Amino acid sequence: MTYARAVPQPADRRWPFEDPPNTACFTTVGVLWHGVPVGLVTHDEDDGAFQFLPFGGAANRDDPDECRLVGLGEMLSQDPTLAEVADLPLGWCAMREAPGQPWRREPLAPDE
């Protein structure tokens, strides 16, 4: 089981997500343990869960050996730029071309 670390926050910075830091979200082994950057974020309409997926790795999200459940705070601790998608609406996704590039947002396709 993976436990979320406390997210260090400067005094003038507020928690950007509506959900608390210990909210469960999904990611992959590559993102969590190997430093693969997040290229796709989904905010699922059915359960409100966030998924933080690697570049080109969306196909691995259904592989139980790749999937990991972590705290939202852990994800923000690993990549502070994820705060930029904290307001992503339910049923939407955000993707970027490369780390440091702007996020492009769009509604999730009905089958995603």
Image: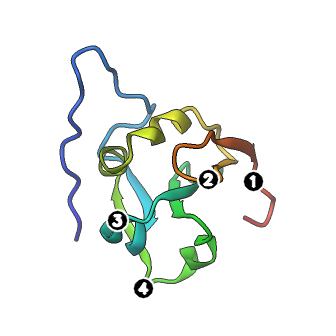
Residue at mark 2 to residue at mark 1: CA–CA distance:
8 Å
Residue at mark 3 to residue at mark 1: CA–CA distance:
24 Å
The residue that disc 3 covers is 32
Foreground of the two, 88 or 98:
98
The x, y position of residue 57, in whole percent, is 58, 72
State if disc 1 and disc 2 touch (CB < 8 Å).
yes
Disc 4 crowd, CA 10 A, few/some/many (<14, 14-19, 20+):
few
Going from N to C along the chain, the mark reached first, 3 or 1, is: 3
Residue found 45% across the figure and 39% down from its top: 81
Going from N to C along the chain, the mark reached first, 4 or 2, is: 2
Going from N to C along the chain, the mark reached first, 3 or 4, is: 3
The residue that disc 4 covers is 65
Q: Is residue 38 rendered to the left or right of residue 77?
A: right
Between disc 3 and disc 4, the foreground one is 3
Disc 3 crowd, CA 10 A, few/some/many (<14, 14-19, 20+):
many
Circle 1 SS class = loop
- Circle 4: residue type: Asp
Between disc 2 and disc 3, the foreground one is 3
Between disc 2 and disc 1, the foreground one is 1
Residue at mark 4 to residue at mark 2: CA–CA distance:
21 Å
Going from N to C along the chain, the mark reached first, 2 or 3, is: 3
Residue at mark 4 to residue at mark 1: CA–CA distance:
24 Å
- Circle 3: residue type: Leu
